[in-house]
Image (cartoon, grey):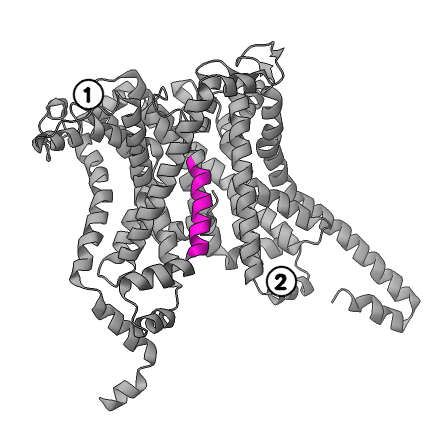
Amino acid sequence: MTASILQSPARPVSRRRRLNRSSPAGYVPLILSAAVIVIPLLWMAIGSLKTSDEVVTQRLVLVPSHPSFAAYQTASELVDFPRLFLNSFIVTFVGSLVKIVLAITSAYGLVFVRFPFKRIIFLGILVALMVPSQAALLPNYTFIASLGGVNTYWGIILPGLGTAFGTFLLRQHFLTLPPELLEAAEVDGAGHFTRLTRIVVPVSRPTIATVALVTIVTEWNDYIWPLVITNSQQMMTLPVGLTLLHNTESDPSLYPVMMAGAVLVVLPVLIVFAVLQRQIVAGLTQGAVK
Amino acid sequence: MEATLPESGAVSGAPPRTRVARRTRSRSARDAWVFVACVAPNVALIIAFIYRPLISNIYYSTLNWSLGDRYATRVGFGNYVQFFTGSDAGTILGTTAIFTIATVGGSMIIGLALSLVLNQRLIGRGFARATVFAPYVLSGVGIGLVWTFIFDPTTGALSDILRGLGLSAPNWFGNPHLTLLMVIIVYVWKNLGYCAVIYLAALQAVPVDVLEAASIDGAGAWNRFWRVTLPLISPTTFFLLLTTILSSLQAFDLLYIISPQGYGTNTLMFATYYQAFQASQAGYSAAISTILFAILLIMTVIQMVLIERRVHYR
């Protein structure tokens, strides 16, 4: 026993003391706050399984008596959900892929390639991180519209492709890589392309994954730009198409249908978040400006 | 390494020196091309879609023009005069101020309280941390729809509960102040997890020995929090204050889903969208977004100055 006391360093003891101090009463706010977040999300899922009758009553129906996917079917009849899903998928996939590649190459150039004015260029990218993209709505609309980009995939994707966030995060990471790693490759005669694809990218995989996740989630949820640049149902993304459901019908019996739509837009992100929450939280709280 | 090469060349004679110099020059020329290929596409996109619009907006704001029209008339500062002398300045700026102050204050105070809860060594706090953060990454449209459903005055769950308690259910959508309150509640609900997680990281960086020293000196939990913890995490408070102000000023999707006509929720950001794309007053919209941008710029400058000072302190 004396040996164990001697061996255990001071820190764990103080930790144990702190542990004892947190009483079981601490669980009340913990459970309460988790419940405040979970219940509305659960309510969305439950609502989507209800029938119109169970929603229209002024009585609180906690569990639907005959849970069914009827609302999902009705939703698909009102708006073309497979098509909206496909549009969202294409926009998110292509947009994120290009953004990540641009972020990697820009960060590589800024860190590992000799060039004058590098600092000024980086500063220009950094300041862009702080410029509100929302205030650019109207000029970007007139520009893309004049190029014929209304109701096209490229029109939805193009204005968002410049990436200050990813460049910034990856540059900060590349700066921490040991220079010897690349010097050795340079001596061996490896060109920039080989150094980038064989060394820098493989050793930076976790940071790239973080940037990728944040980019994908942001693209999927993006709303105001796809809203203004599309007006044909065929080209809308999922969040924009859902608005259609909401705006055209203000009939309360349609709530299950709206909840079904909400589940479809929220669920993919929720699943990804459940699996990879550590990286997503880290990415979003690091580049905390956007 | 670069500097030593020509020198060693100079020692062994003139010809190698020029050869090395030529090689270095051609390599730096190649490097320049590599740099341009790597960085130019991104920079071009940023200039075209982030910087250029700022200037275009200022130009558009001097026009009387509606979207899709081929011709516009110049009105100089007319749009700004219209904004500041009409009723819009009061309602839009007032709504923006109330929405921003309430959402920033709400999510920061509740976020801080939540981070204190999450900082205790309790079973399941990792799960609670993830849960609380989740709404921040979810689509504002999906979140807006659920809360519209919950707040519905006749069929919503909240109304059912209030009636069950013998209270009357307010018509959240019928009164502009209640609509704004509802949007604020939903926005805080969606964003407080972000503040909580950032505060949690700050709390975990507070050195335990400082707290223990305060405890030995007889400071109770209340005093330790106000006199030790809160001052130590003040840089995080500054950071959160400015980042959440910036995002609250740009909030759109929740507002638009819950109140599509901007009834009670007509903020600068909402008005920017609404005037251009619903009310056919593009020039006026550009003036409003220029005002919004000016406010955001001031906020960003304050943030940069404060961060600068913080860095110098260390």
Q: Position of residue B198 (x, y in %)?
A: 39, 53
Camera-near label (1 vs 2) is 1
Q: Position of residue B150 (x, y in %)?
A: 21, 31
Which residue matches tag 2? A182
Of residues A19 and B268, the one nearer the viewer is B268
> Residue at position x 47%, y 44% from top?
B242
Please state if B270 lies on the left or on the right of A30 as rendered: right
Q: Amino acid at mark 1?
A: Pro
Split into 4 quadrants, where in the image is the C terminus of chain B?
A: bottom right
Q: Are marks 1 and 2 in contact (CB under 8 Å)?
A: no
Looking at the rendered structure, the secondary structure element under dot 1 is: helix
Please tell me whether the stretch drawn in magenta is mainly helix, strand or loop: helix
Of residues A235 and A220, the one nearer the viewer is A220
Specify the farthest residue to the bottom.
Answer: A2
Please state if A266 lies on the left or on the right of B30 as rendered: left
> Residue at position x 39%, y 64% from top?
B206
Q: Position of residue A123 (x, y in %)?
A: 63, 46
Which portion, as a residue range, is magenta? B234-248
Which residue matches tag 1? A252
Please state if A155 lies on the left or on the right of A192 as rendered: left
Label 2 crowd bin: few (<14), some (14–19), many (20+), radius 10 Å: some
Of residues A136 and A208, the one nearer the viewer is A136
> Residue at position x 25%, y 73% from top?
A17
**Residue B241 included in the magenta stretch of the image:** yes
**Residue A200 included in the magenta stretch of the image:** no
What is the spatial separation of the Cα atoms under label 1 and label 2, in whole angstroms?
Answer: 63 Å
Q: Position of residue A286 (x, y in %)?
A: 46, 52
Residue B157, picture quadrant: top left
Mark 1 or mark 2: whose residue is earlier in sequence: 2
